[in-house]
Image (cartoon, rainbow, N blue to C red):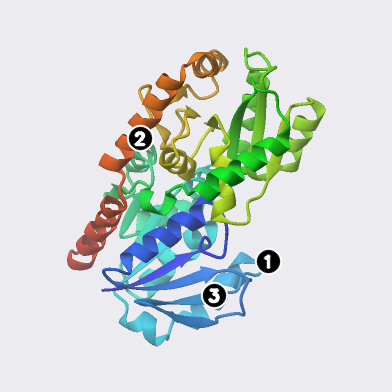
Amino acid sequence: MRIIWFTENYPPNKGGMSRSCDRIVSNLRQHYTVDVFHFTNKFPAFKTESHENGSYTSVPIFEDSSYTLNMLWAFIKDHSVIKVSTVFTAFGSHLCLKGITLMANWLQKPVLICFRGNDFDNAIFSQKKQDLLYTISNATAIACVSSEKEERIKRMKLNNNVYFTPNSIDFEQWNVLNSDRTLASQIKSGLQLTKNTKIIGLIGFLKSKKGIDFFMETLKKSQLLKTVHLRIVGEIEPHIEAQFIASNWSYSKIQPTSKTELMANYLLCDAVAIPSIYDGMPNVIFEAAALNIPVIASKAGGIPDILNHDNAFLFDVLSENKLLQALADFDNSTKTILQEKSNNLKQTIKLAFTTQQEIKNYIDIFNTITTTNYEI
């Protein structure tokens, strides 16, 4: 089987979507040939490199998305690799939603559309809705990173072939070295915090959907107010940081330049918070679990597919009272309770969210849509 994989999220891009895409493609290449077509301007236009069990081609992005997609169509319509391919896959992003299903149908290829987080959530209530509805109606199958999104798309009654394909993690890739702990201690010492300060990490690209505004307003009313330091690990929207500055919060920020630096910043945290209003299935949950860091999170999107009250401090989306309770429960927990929750979360993921299960989900879909004449 030869899979053509279109995406805007792939290394050297940073972020959870890129890490997920890289993990899935790498694991699929253990079974099939996967040719990645990456929308990016970080490399020359349509530069192709050979990879083990596949290839990588950079697709230029222009200000006009229609021009971008017409350029892609001109490049692939008679391409020899495209002609011998078995199936198309579109992994997130509006460019994929807008163009790949159309191109697959023109070329008479089955196509799997992978919905992650923002790709569906942003489009369904925007001017991009018609592109989204066409894609859902005309894709051969749809893969959803959360059961919540799977159910919502099924209830739209536009496509019968919708599947739950959750994220995963390879814990062996997140083994903690002494050097990681040493770096974490050095960073923590540099923050010059008091002994009773608790560090809560806010990790990833902190956009509005992540509920940071709500989290900060609620935190002001919590018992943690005077003893918490917020560690921002990743990118933050300017208006959100302006609120940090105006409120005189104890906070610090960093954009890690390596996995070692990322791990060290996890390790200095007493907990990580994911107060999302809507979301997919954040990689932060998996990474925190691998490093035994407790999680405080809302029940948004795919988060409840993994977290429960036995393995995390959960609260209802946008519920101030529930978040205050979750923060108090965390603050009042003994080291034993915190360790128990962390162990429970790691065990949950080891049982149900392995890389082997993740790839099996995709392989099962590919086998089905390439051997069956599906009725959409």
Name which of mark 2 and mark 1 comes first in the sequence. Answer: 1
Image quarter of residue 270: top right
The count of marks equals: 3
- Residue under label 1, please give it: 63
Seen from the viewer's position, the closer of residues 174 and 123 is 174
Numbered mark located on residue 305 in the image: 2
Numbered mark located on residue 58 in the image: 3
Kindly identify the amino acid type of the residue bearing the numbered disc 2.
Asp
Q: Residue at x 33, y 40 (%)?
A: 349
The reply to whether callout 2 and callout 1 are in contact (CB within 8 Å) is no
Q: Position of residue 114 (x, y in %)?
A: 40, 55
Whether residue 292 is situated above or below residue 93 in the rendered picture: above
Spatial separation of the CA atoms under disc 2 and disc 1: 37 Å
Name which of mark 1 and mark 3 comes first in the sequence. Answer: 3
Secondary element under disc 3, as helix, strand or loop, is strand
Kindly identify the amino acid type of the residue bearing the numbered disc 3.
Ser
Name the side, left or right, on which 291 lies relative to 346.
right
Image quarter of residue 111: bottom left
The reply to whether callout 2 and callout 3 are in contact (CB within 8 Å) is no
Spatial separation of the CA atoms under disc 1 and disc 3: 16 Å
Q: Residue at x 44, y 71 (%)?
A: 36
Question: Visible in this render: residue 97?
Answer: yes
Secondary element under disc 1, as helix, strand or loop, is loop
Numbered mark located on residue 240 in the image: none
Seen from the viewer's position, the closer of residues 233 and 372 is 233
Q: Quadrant of the C terminus?
A: bottom left
